[in-house]
Amino acid sequence: MISNSHKIISVTNLSELSEVGIEESFVMCYGHFNVIHPGHIRFLQYAKTLGKKLKVAVLGDRSIAESQRSKYFHQMERAEGVASLNFVDSVYVLDQITLAELLTKIKPSNLVLGKELEHTDRKDILDAQSVLENNNGKVIFHAGDIHYASVDLLHGSQQDLELERKQLFTQACKRQGIDLVKLSDQINQFSNSRILVLGDTIVDQYVACDAIGMSAEAPVLVVKELETREFVGGAGVVAAHVKALGTDCTFLSVVGEDQNANLVRKNLEEQGIDVQLINDSSRPTTFKIRYMVENQKLFRVSRLKEHSLSKNIEDQFIERLRKIVKNYDGILVCDFVYGVITPRILSEIQQLAKENEILLFGDLQCSSQVGNVAKFEEFDLICPTEREARIALSNHEDGVEWIANTLLEKTRSKNLLVKLGAEGFISYSNESPGDFKKKEHFPALVSNPVDVAGAGDSLLAAMAASMCSGASLMEASAIGACMAALAVQTVGNIPVSHQKLENYIKKLERI
């Protein structure tokens, strides 16, 4: 790995610094940067656009409270992480001086700070702001530009990008003390656990098409159907992923009285899943059709009714839940916001999990629906996308870090996983005493996925199976990242077996 130590300046005394004129137009950023993740990168990339050079001040170990110091990486390790970013020109480690003292000496044109610090009463920030403004500099509060897609493929080959991501993955594992060799042992423990999966059932139909061209009558794309194939989706495929990993699984859901309900039952029972379906004549089983040319989706058609369950169906669901719940290590709530997870049912799930000391996992998917992940209170793990987390907090300005910490506090959940699409995900643990949140970024290991439809479902299944078998959040996250990488390499949401997962991890061991 290339060293970037030439960029790093450890400042123990102001006399070590030579004065820099403001005409050089450089920008300064500041933070502890304990674990570099996409939120930091967005923030620093934005700052870079404001000047010719970007310099970053890293909080020294001495400035961190002694009671919290052991939870942070050493100041030089944190500085090395920032310096590894090619758009950062230099890094100052504030060993024995303050940010205000540094700014007095080197006089940047702009100081860029996180949006969440705009109204802070922290002395180090207020002093720095005063110094810069007295030197005709400008303080800017910004979180960086928010985006939900990646442009990485514009800057390198797929092979190079995937090698880089796998190297970042192994670095993340090393930081968290995760031995990839031992993850296989963890996967073999999945068979000792039992998981109950609850939520909306969906049948996904994929229609492979041949593109004929544009219609001469209107600007409409004309395709010819070649082949169709149906897959169990929604909470059903999460149950299938759980079972394929070797975990004993029961699936409880509500379906219509139709052929698609029969398809779901037959498919899941053939996989060895205990299927508990309640029929509701007022709503068809949700059915989605995706038209594709090659591996490109053209559009989707959904046949569904989104009304909540009637009291009679709710009663049946809760009665069935109470009857079987004591037999499980974990409950996995997959809410696609099509009406199955009603407030009453969710409240019952939360109460039963607490009474029986069962781990509780939650995922709410509202790509085209309206939902709020903050309703998952006191869960052991919730897994929103960044967009879903921002919707829950009505916040589209602050950084990912602030969003994650606020959502953890609001829901009082033990752990949080924020999915960042092509940038992977960040895992946060809320179980440490005090305000410190342990976190780690796990990159997406596949740069050009064939079908991303199964990424979140497979990740959730792997997280639940791992944690129910005794894995830590970070160990589960490493397994989950590998699981998602396998899931996006095939068309359709197809369960990934524990053997494929073990083989994939063994390949990463050799990198």
Image: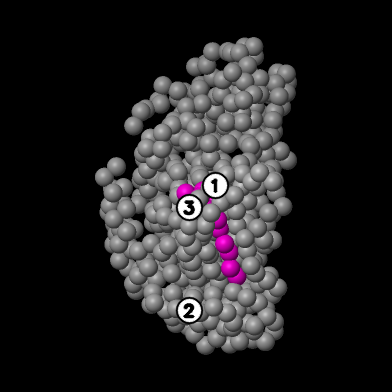
The label number, if any, that marks residue 265 in the structure image: 2
Q: Quadrant of the C terminus?
A: top left
The answer to whether mark 3 and mark 2 are in CB contact below 8 A is no
- N-terminal-most mark, 3 or 2: 2
Disc 3: which residue: 451
Identify which residue, 87 or 154, lies in the foreground: 154
Q: Which residues are magenta?
A: 286-297
**Residue at 52% of width from left, 16% of height from top?**
17
- N-terminal-most mark, 1 or 2: 1
Residue 171 screen position, x and y as percent: 38, 42
Q: Is residue 492 visible?
A: yes
Residue 105 inside the magenta-drawn segment: no
Q: Is residue 343 visible?
A: no
Magenta segment, prevailing SS (helix, strand or loop) = strand
Identify which residue, 251 or 11, lies in the foreground: 251
**How many marks do you count on the picture?**
3
Identify which residue, 178 or 196, lies in the foreground: 196
Q: Residues within 10 Å of mark 2 (few under 14, many from 20)?
A: some
Which secondary structure lies at badge 1? strand
The amino acid marked with disc number 2 is Arg
Mark 3 vs mark 1, foreground winner is 1
**Residue at 49% of width from left, 85% of height from top?**
324
Q: Is residue 354 above or below residue 374?
A: below
Residue 302 screen position, x and y as percent: 63, 63
Q: Is residue 115 above or below residue 383?
A: above
Instruction: Name the image colouring.
Output: one colour
Which secondary structure lies at badge 2? helix
Disc 1: which residue: 212
